[in-house]
Amino acid sequence: MTTQNTASGPFNGIRVLELADEKGQWCGKLLGDLGADVIKIEPPDGENARTVGPFYKDVDNPERSLSFWHYNTSKRSVTLNLETEDGRALFRRMIATADVVLETFRPGYLASLGLGYNDMKKLNPSVILCSLTPFGQTGPWRDFETSDLLHLAAGGQMGSCGYDDIPDAPPIAPGGGQAWHMGSHYACMAITAALIHRANAGLGQYIDVSIHESCALTTEGAMSAWIYTGKTMIRQTGRHAGIAPTPPTQTLCKDGKYINIQLIAMRLPASQLRSLAEWMDKYGMADDLMDEKYKDTSAIQQEADHISLTVRKFINNMTRDEVYRGAQELGFSWGAVRTHDELLDDGQLNDRGFWVQVDNPELNETFTYPGTSAIWSESPWQITRRAPLLGEHNQEIFCDEFGLSQAELTALSENLAL
């Protein structure tokens, strides 16, 4: 799919003013790729997210951040200095046309400029303001400094991530800004709910999203396990943490690659074990698993360790893709562990049209981007444009839409309002 500058999708017709750094730009992308008109409002020297590498062809340039490219598709960009009265005046005009304002400033910053929610709703009673901050607008931690690493530790994710086959292994932080993703997801869900509420009641509202609370709510069973059993999760290599150890899942293949298997031998139905044994027997590696005794469930339970060891020896002597394809044909939910490069040519992802092509006319190139995680038949998703250049749409929005003259735009720029 090659992108076009035409929006569709469930948020088509919704205007979002995004005043977000790395904490909230994913939320803006989610809304934009689903059809919202997301206007990214950046300071005159650009959002800090533009400085995040790696950079295209290793050229350290704010227009070449691959991270920024990914998180800011389907958006338009204007520059605006809210520290100036002219900048604030222009922003107030923008608020009057907005459905949603998404911001990630420190708590109280917008209100200190006369741009808090109470100020906004005087200009636009139906506006929805979503503040996405590290610890929320209230509470003893609201002004604490933060980072992705801190949130993954304090939120609980690191307590469930790590290795159990290395003595005294420390917790491991997942990479890729996972805390920012969690906060953005909750912000997106809250904004969606607020838009539905507004459609029914005609009222806007203020949404206070805490990244810390978003992380704490995304620990799955860790919190409930502690609440109901008083036990903490055990970190386990390549598999979900649990309050009790579970069988290993990642298994090394003969080509040095890994397969992720779900094999709890004592629960394996006799028919499935037979199918597995017949497959292994074709390669002369079934050991005694073809024996008639394994038609008895009690024998499977008694020999569970032996069965598991035999199956793993078989996997050790096969290539990853041989195991993956064979297991899938038999109906086993075993998955190949693939590198990023391999995913670009993954048959499943290609057949579902996951990878999409995004045009970049400035570089006269087209780039492959990750697509959507779901396919919606009635609410289409698409990347409508590549990430915007800094202030790319100043004239389009400020002049063509709000009626500023070119002279006024130039004066605002010279006065450091843009």
Image (tube, grey):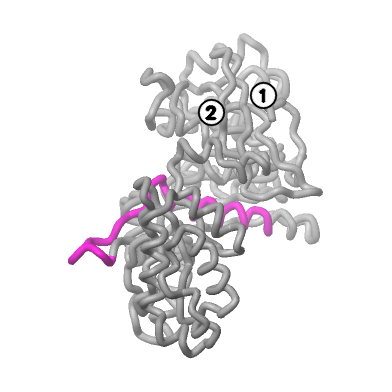
Q: Write down the region rendered in magenta.
A: 164-193
- Which image quarter: residue 164? bottom left
Residue that label 1 marks: 397
Where is mark 2, residue-wise? 87
- In the structure shown, which secondary structural element does the residue marked by tag 2 occupy? helix
Q: Residues within 10 Å of mark 2 (few under 14, many from 20)?
A: some
**Amino acid identity at mark 2:** Gly
Q: Marks 2 and 1, Cα distance to the nearest angstrom?
A: 14 Å
Q: Any magenta on residue 177?
A: yes
At horizontal 58% and vertical 12% (from top left) the residue drawn is: 364
Residue at 53 percent across and 87 percent down: it is 296
Residue 321 % position (x, y): 49, 48
> Residue 84, relative to residue 22: is it above or below?
above
Inspect the image, locate mark 1, and give the three-letter code of the amino acid beneath it: Ile
Image quadrant occupied by the N terminus:
top right
Which residue is at 59% across, 33% downward? Answer: 73
Q: Residues within 10 Å of mark 1 (few under 14, many from 20)?
A: some
- The answer to whether residue 365 is above or below residue 283 is above
Residue 256 location (% of width, % of height): 34, 47
Looking at the image, which is closer to me, 274 or 206? 274
Check disc 1 and report its element: helix, strand or loop: helix
Residue furthest left as drawn: 168
Quick check: is 241 in the magenta stretch?
A: no
- Image coords of residue 276 (percent x, y): 53, 67
In this rendering, would 60 be left or right of 75? left
Q: Locate residue 44, reporting x and y percent.
A: 46, 23
Q: Nearer the viewer, residue 98 or 157?
A: 157
